[in-house]
Amino acid sequence: MSVQSGESRHRVVVIGSGFGGLFSTQALKNADVDVTLIGRTTHHLFQPLLYQVATGILSVGDIAPATRMVLRKQKNARVLLGEVETIDLENKTVTSNLLERRTVTPFDSLIVAAGAGQSYFGNDHFAEFAPGMKTIDDALELRGRILGAFEQAELSDDPDERTRLLTFVVVGAGPTGVELAGQIAELSRRTLRDAFRHIDSTEARVVLLDGAPDVLPVYGGKLSRKTRQTLERLGVQIQLNAMVTDVDADGLTVKEKDGTERRIESQCKVWSAGVAASPLGKQLAEQSGAEIDRAGRVEVLPDLTLPGYPNVFVIGDMMSLDKLPGLAQVAMQGGKYAAKQVIASVEGQDPAQRPPFRYFDKGSMATISRFSAVAKVGKLEITGFLGWIAWLFVHLLYLVGFSSKVSTLLSWAQAFFSTGRNQMAATEQQVFARIALERVRAAEAEQPQPQPQREVG
Amino acid sequence: MSVQSGESRHRVVVIGSGFGGLFSTQALKNADVDVTLIGRTTHHLFQPLLYQVATGILSVGDIAPATRMVLRKQKNARVLLGEVETIDLENKTVTSNLLERRTVTPFDSLIVAAGAGQSYFGNDHFAEFAPGMKTIDDALELRGRILGAFEQAELSDDPDERTRLLTFVVVGAGPTGVELAGQIAELSRRTLRDAFRHIDSTEARVVLLDGAPDVLPVYGGKLSRKTRQTLERLGVQIQLNAMVTDVDADGLTVKEKDGTERRIESQCKVWSAGVAASPLGKQLAEQSGAEIDRAGRVEVLPDLTLPGYPNVFVIGDMMSLDKLPGLAQVAMQGGKYAAKQVIASVEGQDPAQRPPFRYFDKGSMATISRFSAVAKVGKLEITGFLGWIAWLFVHLLYLVGFSSKVSTLLSWAQAFFSTGRNQMAATEQQVFARIALERVRAAEAEQPQPQPQREVG
């Protein structure tokens, strides 16, 4: 087999094509190393805007450039598509798999940035009725679920069924949940306002549920309050201190703080309540003796490496250090830091001399609706229109590719200043396959029900 | 059940949300009628640009606006999602079905514009290995197949397998086939040029097959010759007078004019060789006594109606009249004509007084590559850059929605002037589900083969 790189160069393997993986690879651009980025998807994903794909504002390409295209001019980097199955720290190899085609890639340095998936806190059967919001497939499926629910409601004459179809429940009031609930509300109140004849889309009920006592709890105080007010003005019903104890095809069961249980009838549910780090974390912990926390994240040393393996970095949503949150900025900065340490080691620096990783908090933010966002930069708290402008600017800045920036800006102009949205098509597969599946599962769960027939005059 | 419209208004039912259905509905905007458009998909589809979604240039939203959004301000129109199962000409009703939820819609006038699907000329089992190019799902699936083939080739060390993975076969040298072959060639030669490290994407083989003796046979002469030259310069291998006799997971069998058969090994095949009108045509023919032609199209009277049913119009790809081709313009003009006759009848005109439908040929065109198209307007034949400018202008003009026009122009600027493409992400489902399915089928078809394992570095 031909190998393009010289045999003697330092080999860096990066696992993951998210913020951590992409930024570390790019930071190695001018280094005298060979980089192999192993990705499970063909694309890098700008996850903070995923909710806008789900709600018809942005196209897939706007937030998901092909990793291969982003890196094609970086001569020392190559992209391997496949899911990593095993990391062997002793023998310094990574085995990845693309549909039973296994590839073993040796490394000198390893940067593990495989991210996190949705967590259902042990209730994995919730997933089929309340999908998460972690991948492009999730977002497109959710788009089909949302639009499909409105389409079905338009055809229904049963008031109870129509209420169930027009009730949208978002579980988890973190940034993704808040943004999603806000956008579903805007979709029903503004975008779809005149689109139906039989139902009034503005009557759709959007419920935002969380077990915590506040929305955006990490922000706290004024920002949480402001977020709550804005969401409520949009028509979102916020239900806090409410734990989800069961989810099925037709709704969910919620347990209040006082122990009473109640039921919400809803066809379209989304789960954004928790994350679980990639299962690769467990492998790394077992081999290195590092601890993993409840979310499956690996406790790393101050230089983001595993104990005893100064050549193996764990970054982003997979790492546990100083209670840093699972934010894009943490992953990006971790990626750049790891790349810098790899370069220093290649140049002969002793790993013991490494400065510890320092996270520089550039602030965090969430949009609630058009023209309104909350942002926290250090001690500065910005809300409303100014916060929204800050949000716009920062998100555009970090989107990969000039064309994506322009196209996204254009889509935003349309979505926020007119009542249109550019990506309102759900494919047949998304709408029909999804609805069909829901029905089959509902039928399996209970007795088959007679189908309504009606005549339109 | 509440009915929004007054009971006394003339009820028009339109079947289909393609060019014919959408244009007839819009032409009824100011008429004193109630229009119900029954669509099988949530979106109108600008089918002539579908190949650009498949090859990563345009997003779904650019060419597929939600029908409901397009018509939301047309107060006399409503959109019903569902597949039409039966048309009852005697009782004047249409029964549509959205996942076993049946709706019966009565009509006074009916415009049937349900279009055409892919035809495999009786070999329907070809479909699973060589999907057609008729829907958004088809285009996204093809995108996943194309990019997935390159990804697999990058991982393969078996030269035969790699050749098979890098051979793309387009069956059918009509406009869609020509444009698709041209774009796959540009994708491999320009866009992906530096994206792989193990394979050379520019070595990909693109084969355009047709049983006819020429490409774009409807154009003929100089334009066909010019198209052929341009395609060959792009590296497309054109194989004419070649009938496909079998298709399987790993390739296809081709029969030459002299009767000899040969095999082409290819993982990624597309079928754009034939169309079959909607099966609703057969129902209409049986009930009215109209003839249907070999492609399932209904032979209509000069006013596009069925014999004995002056209130039932059949338009677009479903109608057979004066050998008119299955072009967007024929459907649009048919839709406008039918709407006009409906309005005249409502106003009291005797259907016997109708002027016959006259198709005004505005010309037809196909792009072959960037900066090069062929166009025929009356006797005028335009090729090369000028043809391409004409193509650009006309296609932008007919795209629905200002935002789609701007966004499409932007994507074209990127695709044609730079080497990037904005929509190169294939979702996990598209790439992996597709490849997995192919493998399962291949395994079913023959003995399971050992999987290659290899070591990199």
Image (tube, coloured by chain):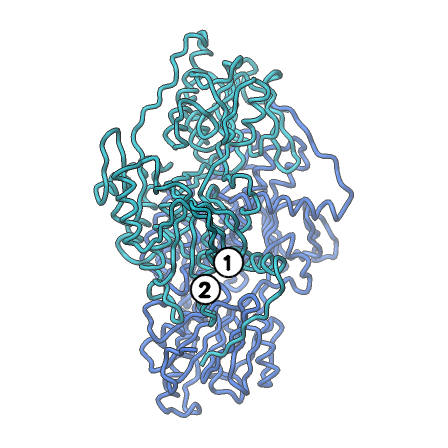
Chain colours: A cyan, B blue
Q: What label does residue A151 carry, if any?
A: 2
Please tell me which residue lies in front, A336 or A157: A157
Chain under callout 2: A
Q: Is residue A396 visible?
A: no
- The secondary element bearing badge 2 is classed as helix
**Cβ–Cβ below 8 Å for labels 1 and 2?**
yes
Label 1 belongs to which residue?
Answer: A431
Please tell me which residue lies in front, B304 or B151: B151
Q: Amino acid at mark 1?
A: Val
The span from disc 1 to disc 2 (Cα, nearest Å) is 9 Å
Q: Amino acid at mark 2?
A: Glu
Q: Picture coordinates of residue A376 (x, y %)? A: 27, 34
Q: Is residue B82 visible?
A: yes
Left or right of A164 on screen, residue A451: right
Q: Quadrant of the N terminus of chain A?
A: top right
Please tell me which residue lies in front, A423 or B350: A423
Chain under callout 1: A
- The secondary element bearing badge 1 is classed as helix
Q: Picture coordinates of residue A322 (x, y %)? A: 40, 22
Report the number of numbered marks: 2
Q: Quadrant of the C terminus of chain A?
A: bottom left
Left or right of A227 on screen, residue B100: right
Residue in view at x 39 percent, y 56 percent: B387
Residue in view at x 61 percent, y 32 percent: B155
Q: Are marks 1 and 2 on the same chain?
A: yes
Local crowd size for mark 2, using a 10 Å CA cut-off: few (<14), some (14–19), many (≥20): many
